Image: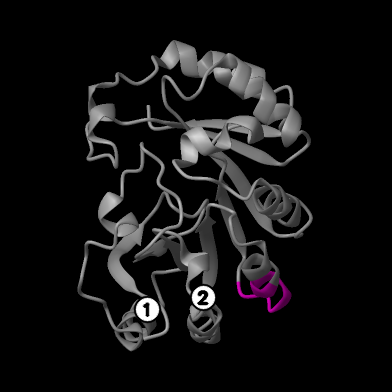
């Protein structure tokens, strides 16, 4: 087993911009974001792994209808076998979108060098100075900043995105993130949902921002990014 595949969403129209994809969920994560909606993957609670050859066979059967995969987690770049798995996916002619927290820039460099990914979505947890509050652990901030630069300079499609949680995000955070990543192509504001299970159960008592507030964040961030989207409302 090269990577721990814990789940598959067979078809998605929203996880890979302008593409039809299957979403591959891997287990394990080095962050402990309190608002995470996949705690069962982060904490590796799903004990059964799906064999990789089963995934490849499924993709081959659906080749007529799928453009590619989105590999997400958990944190995919923690898996040393990720390049080998993606080589098998690419060999079948599929596009690959990677979701990452940016904690492993060396893996990003390897995947880009081998042309194993076609689109990257990096979760920006907070402004650099407040990163550990949102990530829930001590963070190698230099690695996060390096990953962001690698992505901007990659030459492939990408987006940065932040889940906006009251208490962790506000107008000042929007400004700080904007200044840090100024000039990047695309930024996505992701609405926090308290209807799902969260890693910190207490956050389920936290009400999300109102649409009007999200639009104010968008207005601020539009000063720094070429394109800003709001998702989840």
Image: 119 above or below 207:
below
| Earlier residue among tags 2 and 1 | 1
Instruction: Give the magenta-colored segment's residue range.
Output: 110-116
Write the residue at 73% across / 53% down.
146
**Vertical side of 152 occupied by 155: above or below:** below
| Count of all numbered marks drawn on residues in the image | 2
Q: Which residue is drawn at 66% across and 62% down?
A: 105
The image quadrant of residue 179 is: top right
Q: Nearer the viewer, residue 120 or 80?
A: 80
Q: Is mark 2 in CB contact (under 8 Å) with mark 1?
A: yes
- Measured as percent of width and height from the top left, residue 213 is found at 47, 13
Q: What element carries label 2?
A: loop
Residue at the (62%, 50%) spot, across then down:
140
Other-residue count near label 1 (Cα within 10 Å), few / some / many at <14 / 14–19 / ≥20: many
- Determine which of the numbered discs, if any, sits on residue 43 in the image: none
Instruction: From the image, tell me which residue sits under label 1.
Output: 59
Q: Taking 40 as reference, is 77 left or right?
A: right
Does dot 1 land on a helix, a strand or a loop? helix
Question: Which of the image's four quarters has the C terminus?
Answer: top left
Q: Identify the residue at horizontal 42%, vertical 26% (top origin).
A: 165
> Between 162 and 127, which is closer to the camera in this rendering?
127
Magenta residue check for 224: no
Q: Which of 103 and 82 is in front in this view?
A: 103
- Asked which colour scheme the image uses, the reply is one colour
Residue 167 on image: x %, y %: 43, 20
- Observer-nearest of 31 and 86: 31
Q: Among all residues in the image, which is located at the extreme front? A: 138
Real-space CA distance between mark 2 and mark 1, rounded to the nearest whole angstrom: 9 Å
| Image coords of residue 77 (percent x, y) | 53, 66
Where, by quadrant of the figure, is residue 147 drawn? bottom right
For disc 2, the marked residue is 94
């Amino acid at each position: 087993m090269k990577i721990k595949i814990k789940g598959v969403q067979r078809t998605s129209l929203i996880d890979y911009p302008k593409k039809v994809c299957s979403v591959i969920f891997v287990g394990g994560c080095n962050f402990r974001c309190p608002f995470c909606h996949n705690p069962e993957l982060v904490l590796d609670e799903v004990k059964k792994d799906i064999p990789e050859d089963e995934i490849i066979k499924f993709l081959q059967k659906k080749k007529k209808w799928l453009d590619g995969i989105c590999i997400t987690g958990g944190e995919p770049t923690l898996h040393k076998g990720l390049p080998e798995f993606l080589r098998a996916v690419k060999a079948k002619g599929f596009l690959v979108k990677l979701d990452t927290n940016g904690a492993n820039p060396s893996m990003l460099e390897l995947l880009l060098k081998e042309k194993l990914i076609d689109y990257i979505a990096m979760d920006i947890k907070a402004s650099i100075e407040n990163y550990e509050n949102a990530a829930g652990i001590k963070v190698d901030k230099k690695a996060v900043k390096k990953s962001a630069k690698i992505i901007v300079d990659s030459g492939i499609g990408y987006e940065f995105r932040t889940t906006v949680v009251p208490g962790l995000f506000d107008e000042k955070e929007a400004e700080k993130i904007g200044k840090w990543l100024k000039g990047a192509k695309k930024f996505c504001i992701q609405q926090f949902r308290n209807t799902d299970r969260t890693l910190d159960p207490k956050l389920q008592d936290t009400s999300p921002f109102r649409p009007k507030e999200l639009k104010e964040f968008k207005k601020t961030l539009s000063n720094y990014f070429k394109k800003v989207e709001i998702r989840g409302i």
